[in-house]
Amino acid sequence: MSYTSLLRTNRDFRLLFIGQTISQLGDWFNAVAVYALLLDLTGSATAVAWMMIVQFLPVAIVGPIAGVVADRVNRRRLMISTDLLRGCLILVLLVIRRPDEVWIAYVVMALTVGAQGFFEPARTATIPNITSADELLPANALSSATWSAMLAIGASLGGLVTAAAGRNIAFSINAVSFFASAFFINRTRYDATPKAVPRPAGLAALTGFTDLVEGFLYIRQRSHVAALMFVKAGWGLAGGVLLLLTIFGQRVFPLAGGSAAGIGVLYGARGLGAGLGPIALRWILGQNPKRLRQTIGPAFFMIGIFYAALAGATTLPIAAICVLLAHCGGSILWVFSTVLLQMEVPDQFRGRVFAAELALVTLMSSLSSYWTGRQLDHAGWSPRALSLALGLMFFIPGTLWMIIQSRWRDAPSHALEHADATMSSEEEVLEGRVG
């Protein structure tokens, strides 16, 4: 299944894809503008680190209840509601003018990201419902590539627009993008609520506590699901790396036009790399689950090598190449672990599993961002030394995954046995297409 065929023939996925494309373009306009606002008004790396924590931590906090909600309610309506809420919240950023008003940005972004904590599990859990088996990996690779392309385009343009026209234009573009996303998702035809699992009546069931316990037990009893969930938590070390991109763009490789321009270049390289990774490897590996699992360990090492190399970059183009290649590895981790979980987890548990996974990665990213900010502002570490340290840290989850993979049976579950048989029969055709 090629990417163009997928978009041409699958109407619901096409509309979800268009909404995602528009809203993510606005997101990255907004991100560069928010980081530039904090650096310009406070001059503190710790202020940016706290913003990154605010952009991560609410997802971890709402994750358990968000997963229950995504498995109980109509996911399409949940996505529309959270899009509309986020669009309204972003407009509040327009009032910030002085350093003593910076707290508003933290509150707005915390609420916005909290809403995202409900949107993302619903979106990820919906994709297997609107795609066939042979569309699943292309759909996720395309979603990742779109996120990456919008990061590359949005961050680069966002930096230029913020430098040239001001932050409020970037904030306004993001608000409009959420409203546009809600419009396109509203046009999808898939409107089913996840199939309810019969359970005894009572306060625990009514409040969702029973659902929460069921989800925990499901994960605990399936070691392969738990292992796959922790892949993105390992990638959460990148939280500190993302703070470093902001600091490298402002302090190490500044460009004319203010801090936003240099930040935009490095975030653009991040997006380009994240788009190339899964698309290139899908062409090489096909959709065989065993091959996808075996690629995760080397992808961790790839991230570590190139973020360590960033420490020695002497020019902005060299730094951008290091970031691009590191995030090729990062996107491979993200897409392949997502596809494997979608194959493994049944629909009635999917929302809870993906919400828990998102909570893990955001919690790890928050801790990494906080630690990095503290080292920069209070421990006297240079950005280059931190880039080397964080790069070497990625060898830890990479090594752990290689150990896990060496003990992993070729067919960890009935779902993956079926997927292996299905995907292997199509592999020859799929590997011959770029998509």
Image: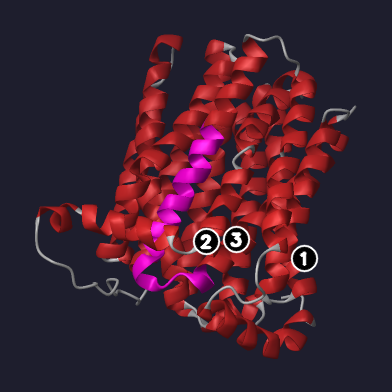
How far apart are the two marked residues, 2 and 1, measured between alpha carbons?
29 Å
Amino acid on which the number 1 mark rests in the picture? Ala
Which residue occupies the foreground of this view, 257 or 296?
A: 296
Quadrant in which the N terminus appears: bottom right
Residue 33 lies, with reference to residue 126, above or below; the image says above
Magenta highlight on residue 77: no
Residue at image mark 3: 337
How far apart are the two marked residues, 3 and 1, measured between alpha carbons?
16 Å
Amino acid on which the number 3 mark rests in the picture? Ser
Quadrant in which the C terminus appears: bottom right
Magenta highlight on residue 351: yes
Bin the neighbour count of mark 3 within 10 Å (Cα to Cα): few under 14, some 14-19, many 20 and up: many
Residue at image mark 2: 223
User: Which circle's residue, 3 or 1, is located before the other in the chain?
Assistant: 1
Identify the residue at horizontal 44%, vertical 38% (top origin). Answer: 172
Instruction: Determine whether, in the image, residue 358 is placed left or right of residue 8.
Output: left
Amino acid on which the number 2 mark rests in the picture? Ser
Q: Is residue 65 visible?
A: yes
Residue 192, percent from left and from top: 29, 75
Residue at image mark 1: 280
Identify the residue at horizontal 53%, vertical 13% (top origin). Answer: 41
Tell me which colouring the rendered structure shows.
secondary structure
